[in-house]
Amino acid sequence: MQLIQYSFRLILVISILLISILSIQEIEPEYSVNYNNKLLHFFCFLYLTTICWLSRIVHKDIWLYVIVLAYGILIEIVQIYIPYRSFEFLDIFADFIGISAGIFFINFLKYLYPNY
C-alpha cells in the first residue's frame, strides 16, 4: 500500500509541475475565453483532486479541497502579472466545479475501496 501511495505522490509532483508550467505558457488569443478552456480547467482539477487524495498527503478531506482550490486561485493570481495571460473568475469557477466533481469521484472510490 505504501508503494502505491509513493507512486501517486510522484505522479502528483509531476502533475503540479506540468500544470504550473502550462499555466504560464502563451496561448492563442482566440482560445482565451473558450468553453474548451473551461473544460480543461474542470478536468484538470478533477484529476488533481483525485491524485491528491490517492497520494494521501493530507488526511482530512476538507483540507485537501481547500489546498487544491488555493492552488487554482494562486495560478490565476500569477497570471495577472504575465503580459500574455489574464485573471478570469470563470477559470476559478471551473476549478471549483472540477474539485466538486472530484469529491463525488473520491466518494465513489471510497465506496469501492473502503480500506484505502
Image (tube, rainbow, N blue to C red):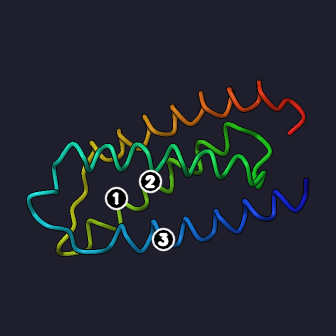
**Where on the picture, by quarter, is residue 106?**
top right
Q: Are marks 3 and 2 in contact (CB under 8 Å)?
A: no
| Residue 4 point in image, percent of width and height | 82, 57
List x then y, in percent, for residue 65. 60, 42
- Residue at numbered disc 2: 72
> Looking at the image, do the residues carrying marks 3 and 1 touch, with CB atoms under 8 Å apart?
no
Q: Which residue is mark 3?
A: 18
Q: Which secondary structure lies at badge 3?
A: helix
What's the amino acid at mark 2?
Gly
Q: Amino acid at mark 3?
A: Leu
SS at circle 2 = helix
CA distance for labels 1 and 2: 6 Å
Q: Residues within 10 Å of mark 2 (few under 14, many from 20)?
A: many
Left or right: where 8 falls relative to 73: right
Q: Is residue 68 left or right of residue 82?
A: right
Which of labels 3 and 1 is toward the front?
Answer: 3
The secondary element bearing badge 1 is classed as helix
Label 3, label 2: how far apart the Cα atoms are: 14 Å
The answer to whether the residue labelled 1 contacts the one labelled 2, judged by CB atoms less than 8 Å apart, is yes
Residue linked to disc 1:
76
